[in-house]
Image (cartoon, helix red, strand yellow):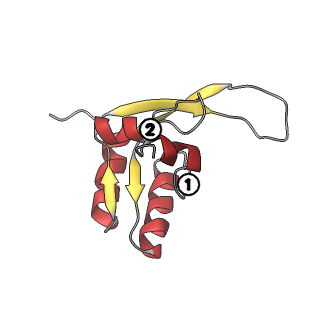
Amino acid sequence: MSTARTVAVPARPDRRFAAGMVATETINTQGLEQHLRRHVTGEVRFDTASLAMYSGDASNFRQVPVGVVVPRTLDDVVATMCACHRYRAPVVSRGGAPASRARRSTTPS
């Protein structure tokens, strides 16, 4: 018997109204991962190392993602958005690391 992995993420109210986090949304991460692996030709990452790598940016803010998708095609983007909608998972698009992050990973001259 297999149990589904789940994760709770903050659920925010409508942005038009003044309120903080009011609840959490539970996401079936195992179902989301399986769905993405079936429908996306790009990379689908749910391993701990990848999640840690994508959890920060150039600020002090750190939020571990539910999963990471590196799409190869526009169809991958559409399939990812559909899967996230189906499993009620939040989506954050990242085009690339900011310059300050890139400088940190290179050797100074």
Q: Residue furthest left?
A: 1
What residue is at 45 percent from the left and 60 percent from the top?
80
Q: Report whether residue 88 is seen.
A: no
Classify mark 1: helix, strand or loop.
loop
Position of 87 relative to 27 (above/below):
below
Q: Residue furthest front?
A: 109
Image quarter of the N terminus: top left
Please tell me the numbered disc located at residue 27: 2
Classify mark 2: helix, strand or loop.
strand
Residue type at mark 1 is: Ser
Q: Position of residue 65 (x, y in %)?
A: 45, 39
Position of 37 relative to 65 (above/below):
below
Q: Quadrant of residue 73?
A: bottom left
Q: Is residue 94 left or right of residue 106?
A: right
Q: Report whether residue 70 is seen.
A: yes
Q: Position of residue 27 (x, y in %)?
A: 44, 38
Do the residues bearing badges 1 and 2 touch, measured as CB atoms within 8 Å? no
Q: Quadrant of residue 67?
A: top left
What residue is at 28 percent from the left and 58 percent from the top?
37
Residue type at mark 2 is: Ile
Q: Residue furthest right?
A: 17
Q: Position of residue 17 (x, y in %)?
A: 85, 35
